[in-house]
Image (cartoon, rainbow, N blue to C red):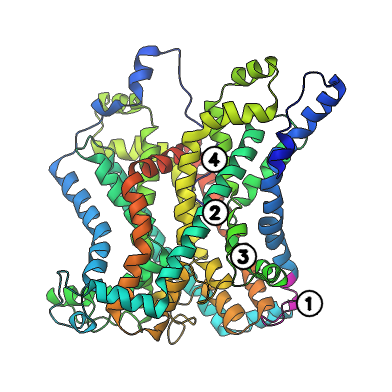
Amino acid sequence: MTTLAAPPTKQPAPEKPAPATRGRSRAGRTMKGGKLAYAILIAAVLVSAFPFYWTIVAASRSNADLAKVPPTLLPGPNLIRNFEAVMEEADIGKALLNSFIVSGSITVGTVLCCTLAGFAFAKLRFRGRGALLAVTVGTMMIPPQLGVIPLFMLIAELQWVNQLQAVILPGLVSAFGVFFMRQYLVQSLPDELIEAARVDGASTARIFWSIVVPVARPGMAVLGMLTFMAAWNDFFWPIVALSSQEPTVQVALRQLGGGYVHDQSVIMAGTLLGTLPVLLVFGLLGRQIVGGIMQGAVKG
Amino acid sequence: MTLTASAKPVAPSRPPAVRRAWRKLSPYAYIAPFFTLFAAFGLFPLIYTAFVSLYRVELQTPGDMEWRGLGNYTALLGDEFFWTALRNTFTIGVISTVPQLVMALGLAHLLNYRLRGRTFLRTAMLLPYATSVAAATLVFAQLFGRDFGLINYVLGLVGFGPVDWQTGTVASQIAVSTIVIWRWTGYNALIYLAGMQSIPTELYEAAEMDGASRWRQFLHVTLPGLRPTILFTVVVSTIGATQLFGEPLLFEGSISGGISHQYQTLGLYMYEQGWGFFHLGRAAAIAWVMFLLILVLVGANALIARRRSRKEAGR
């Protein structure tokens, strides 16, 4: 879903050895940030972070606290009680488990499919390669939301409504992922490596597992993180295909926001629980995710 | 499954003809898993939408299809709420996209300075992108509360009367757009930053030698260098804006987008027709209209971009 556009623009320039190696980290040449720059950036960080803080405050208070003027801005003692309430009212526990199953399967499956196809598009010759790649890239910009009606009819026909595979299987389709892995492998896997292995008599499958996958691993990791977050946060299709009997986190949150629960602090507790896992991933791998998005922007 | 098929080691003793044939065919084994899924769950639904939009299909009996010709489309054009949704999609799209991209550009420019803790700054700005639409909307719905919302309280401190963020058309659209802006500004800032970092430093050095101020450097080096990136973000944001769904749905939890449809978008209107009123055929017609809308908007973007760069080249 993220990035695409023009073909890779950044090519290493071996003919200028000295500046080229320094070229990437040209921090020394860029202008130093002044006080105003810091002030604006820190304000932006605060605006980004405040809703998270507020979620914690609201989730640890009672509904009555939230209706006070002036508003309370510090966390209170009710967090556990609100967690219990939301477990009961929206079955967040099951939703979390389902979301892990769905997002985990989508991540593993997508990375595998996209690496296989990306490798074929990057390094193998076959009839129809250009056309198939064009179809893949061409649909990348078309939002999947436009296909939900036939997709729903298909799922209904298969009797998959309210079953997790209804969300998992369509989730495995990532044209972006194929393109991303193709670009990654075009840039990082030299043809000579594959030729040498072929001369040694290695089959394509052998080459894939012992040469391509190790080289592709960093790209696969980036794609995996982006896929996991997108799958965890996906909203439209899960609320169509699933219901409160078999919810993912987003389906449960929709139910919470649907007006049946009136206790705002309970709603915020649910929001907090549903967001924590992604925040955790983000806390651990934030730097890589930032790198992945910026890299994708330049590459794609 | 296809993996095991292709994993068969090619024994050196195999006759070369078989080997050659296998080498010709085996690439397809690598793209097969993706294309099987892509055909079934990606391409087929997109194409079939046009077909479904010509039929009467009800949610309870999705297997029964009754020919309606263009009936779904004429019904759509005669529904005032369709026009409301179309208008709302447009206004919310502008209110959310324009400030978002302008702010992202400014933030990217600042992030491109030599900074302490730049990894932290970048990561923190991407934080909203990691939250789901549902979570972000529920939190903002609370902050935008009419009586006890924090935003009205702060506005009250500086002397603004309480704003009814739910009922007012403009107010509710601003509120919904705020959620979009909050979630996507940091992401776009990072995209711009990546674009800025690939502009050769020599250009800045040359500009400096010509005595160009920082602002002029931004105007005459950074912006032209970013043109493809800006076009990319404009296109992606435009497409995102036409699809807007979760924010208006969860802002108050109603599928009609407010009491008088004041912030119902096309995406939400489609959901209401399909899953609120059970008219899947009608919903498919809306999807098709949205697709055409995207084509027109992206085409317009591309045209403007091409016109501008031609003008530039002519200068």
Q: What element carries label 1?
A: loop
Mark 4 vs mark 3: give the one in front: 3
Numbered disc in front, either 2 or 1: 2
Sequence order check: which comes first, mark 2 or mark 4?
2
Segment tinted magenta in the rendering: B52-63
* Dot in front, 3 or 2: 2
Which of the marked residues, 3 or 2, is nearer the chain's N terminus? 2
Q: Mark 3 belongs to which amino acid?
A: Ala
Residue receiving disc 1: B69
Residue highlighted by disc 3: A166
Identify the subunit bearing mark 3.
A
Marks 3 and 2 share the same chain: yes
Q: Do labels 4 and 1 share a chain?
A: no
Callout 2: SS: helix
Q: Residues within 10 Å of mark 2 (few under 14, many from 20)?
A: some
Q: Distance between the residues labelled 3 and 2?
A: 12 Å
Picture coordinates of residue B85, whole percent (x, y):
52, 76
Q: What element carries label 3?
A: helix
Mark sitting on residue A105: 2
Q: Position of residue A60 (x, y in %)?
A: 22, 72
> Are the two marked residues, 2 and 1, in contact with CB atoms closer than 8 angstroms?
no
